[in-house]
Image (cartoon, rainbow, N blue to C red):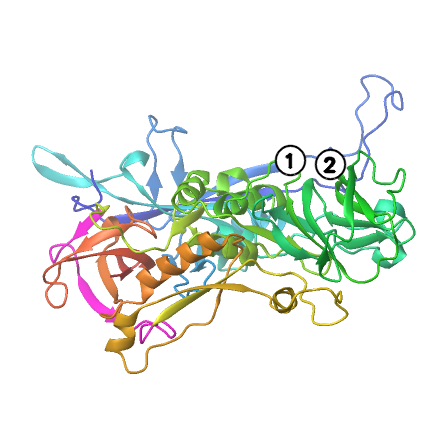
Amino acid sequence: MSLTTGTGPLFLAAEIEAYQPPNGSDAAPGEAHGVLPQGVLSLTSPIVADTATVRASDVGYVTRETDAGGLQVYPPILISGVELDRAMDLSPNGQGAAAGWGSLRLANERDALTALALTRNADGRPVRLRIGRKVALSANGAFLDWRDPPLADTLPVLSGIAAGWSVDEAELRLALRDPTYWIERPADGATYGGTGALDGNAALAGKRKPRLRGGSAANPVREISPQLVDPVAGIYQISDAPGAVVALYERGLAGGITLNAIVADITGAAPPAATYNVESSARGLFMRLGSFPPAGVITVNAWGAFPDSTAPSVAATVALELLEQDLAVPSGLINTASFAKLAAAAPWAAGVFLNTDEPLDGVAVVGQLLRSSAGRLVPSRAGQLTAVSLAPVPAGALPAASFTAAEIVACTPRPLSPPLSPPPFRMRVGWGRSFTTQTSALAPTLTGARIQELAQTWRVAAASSTAVSNAWRRPSDPPLVETSLTNSTHAAALAMLLRDLWCVAGERRLYDVAVPLPLALARDLGDVVSMTFPGPLASGAVGRIVGEQIRTLDDLATFQVLI
């Protein structure tokens, strides 16, 4: 029976993965072979980890024997529904989607859940919530009772991550999080041990090794200050993974120090004076100067691969590899197809550099790469980190769903926040970031253009709308959109796309659209939908879902649709 056509009461069914750690120290050794006679049992309890699934429902639910997983009981111990809030960050400098998934409350009748909460934990473990509708059971045309539907007839409300639980004599409370929980903390990566040579001297002990990801020979990451790891031999580290040096500058001047050789071991023979050697290996990307110390600041333009030697240069693909390799997000929590789709739509060159003092904040770095692709990082309803386009809806695009007055319960306008209201008259995109700006102690032979270039953090591409300037007395002028782009043509393309999205004389409109919960669960953030409703939308309009609020107790969901 369909959720949208049935008449039975709705129910919720929750699954929570609970982990029991080993009952002793991870370092506790077992008995060595030969310590005890064969066949004699040890008096020490075995150290065994265990994972179990806790099931609960608000009114009770039992799957059918023919369902995947067979017969499963969801006892009626779920006290209340779930509140789910998700919304894309619409600001031009936005980096992801805000999500708050509330909590689950389970009745702790007769302390049935106390031992569970004290011996197991759910932090970082999967939580799944589904909704279904009871099916009328009848005989000879007479209603008898409500019957539970097959699992396949239920729909997912969310698939998230637990953020810890607490228990008292009345209930067990479990906080819920979306998949960005995995990447909100910095990922420190490898650090220097301070033992000398490529491990750094004592001054570097405990500091993070630099990371360079993305860029290419044609579009390198600019003006990187490599980390001096061996001040005796004159060895610098550019990244903790392979890569290549495209250009080397001394005091802002190129050509004074030239490439001598690509070597297998940078710690071997020193290069001749006024030259440098490069090592690109599993140990990282290093360079060694033949004349050390140099006359002034050393910077490089370079590109960097990932630890497995893959070397993507398209912004969305670099973001995907960061999630998988540097942030170690489990593969099941990433919608890889969505990143490939965004990379195909915006195949724009990009790269990022993280120095020893800059931790890898996953939300910020991945968010900037997706912003460089006119996209956002969104936690999907299925519990995956998803790359979603935030671009104008193409002309002639087929909507994923159509909502009319027959389905829409309420439709009200919601104001856009500054700097999107009033509409902006231009969009400026920062690209080709200089990771080392210099204004003094420069080489005396530098041109004025090069001196000016070295003083600027960003190169800028801009696109403006005279229609907005003519229609609005005080149009807004948003801050520079900071990106990871390394190519001027690609930056100009992003600036024009952002102009077409936001620099609209008639102004973009945002609507709160309330629809029955079963209809809403078939849609997700980023979907293109059409709406027809009395008032400004009487003639119909096509827009993109950019936010939602779900209240399972109300059996309603409210979409935010950008028209």
Tell me if residue 420 is in the magenta stretch: yes
Mark 2 Cα within 10 Å, few/some/many (few <14, many 20+)? some
Secondary structure at numbered mark 1: loop
Q: Position of residue 153 (x, y in %)?
A: 27, 37
In percent of the image, x 32 and y 35: which residue is there?
Answer: 151
Mark 1, residue position = 309
> Chief secondary structure of the magenta span?
loop
Quadrant that contains the N terminus:
top left
- For this orientation, the residue located farthest to the left is 141
334, 452: nearer the viewer: 452
User: What's the residue type where badge 2 is placed?
Assistant: Ala
Question: In this picture, which residue range is highlighted in magenta?
Answer: 401-424
Cα–Cα span, label 2 and label 1: 8 Å
Tell me whether the residue at label 2 lies in contact with that at label 1, contact meaning CB atoms closer than 8 angstroms: yes
457, 30: nearer the viewer: 457
Kindly tell me whether residue 21 is visible in this rendering.
yes
Q: Position of residue 405 (x, y in %)?
A: 11, 58
User: In the image, 187: left or right of 370?
Assistant: right
Q: Position of residue 438 (x, y in %)?
A: 69, 68
Q: Would you identify the image quadrant in which residue 184 lies?
A: bottom right
Mark 2, residue position = 282
Q: Would you identify the image quadrant in which residue 63 lies?
A: top left
Say which label, 2 or 1, has the lower sequence index.
Answer: 2
Q: Position of residue 558 (x, y in %)?
A: 27, 61
